[in-house]
Amino acid sequence: MKSEILGCYAVATAGHDKGRIYIVIDEGEAFLELSDGRLRGLSKLKRKNKKHVQIIKKTSYNKEIREKLLNDSLALSGDNPKRVTDEEIKRAVRLFKNDKREIFHTEG
């Protein structure tokens, strides 16, 4: 069974990258493999302890990425035309950040 947090947003809550937004690419027993599409692309995933991230299950901007990761075991394969790309991840993270800024600016 595939994890329900694959493709979800994750915010680092500890470490030098505290506050950085990622997308969950893979899940192990105690660790998550994360990507932001920029500094941590798919070729250099960030490995982070589950205790040190907050999962955000909002799926408006990362719906396609999430579906690819959940439905296809070859979503990260270079030969697959339906694979997840760094550009898709970068765009989803950027849109999420912009949306978050708008929410806090209108409420404040």
Image: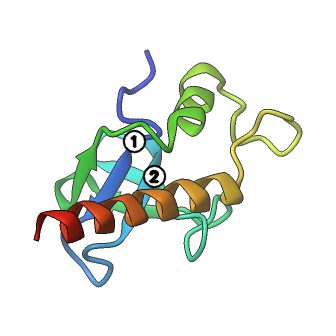
Q: Quadrant of the C terminus?
A: bottom left
| Residue 38 picture quarter | bottom right
Q: Residue at x 65, y 52 (%)?
A: 88
Amino acid type for the residue under numbered disc 2:
Ile
Amino acid type for the residue under numbered disc 1:
Cys
Label placed on residue 8: 1
CA–CA distance in space, label 1 to label 2 = 6 Å
Q: Residue at x 63, y 30 (%)?
A: 68
Residue that numbered label 2 is attached to: 23
Labelled pair 1, 2 in contact (Cβ < 8 Å): yes
Mark 1 / mark 2, whichever is N-terminal: 1
**Where does the image place residue 78, in percent across and percent down from the top left?**
83, 45
Label placed on residue 40: none
| Residue 39 picture quarter | bottom right
Q: Residue at x 30, y 38 (%)?
A: 57
**9 on left or right of 94:** left
Q: Is residue 35 visible?
A: no
Dot 1: element: loop
| Residue 41 picture quarter | bottom right
Q: Is residue 59 visible?
A: yes
**2 on left or right of 76:** left
**Where does the image place residue 103, in percent across and percent down from the top left?**
24, 60
Q: Quadrant of the N terminus?
A: top left
Note whether 80 is above or below 32 in the view shown: above
Q: Residues within 10 Å of mark 1 (few under 14, many from 20)?
A: many
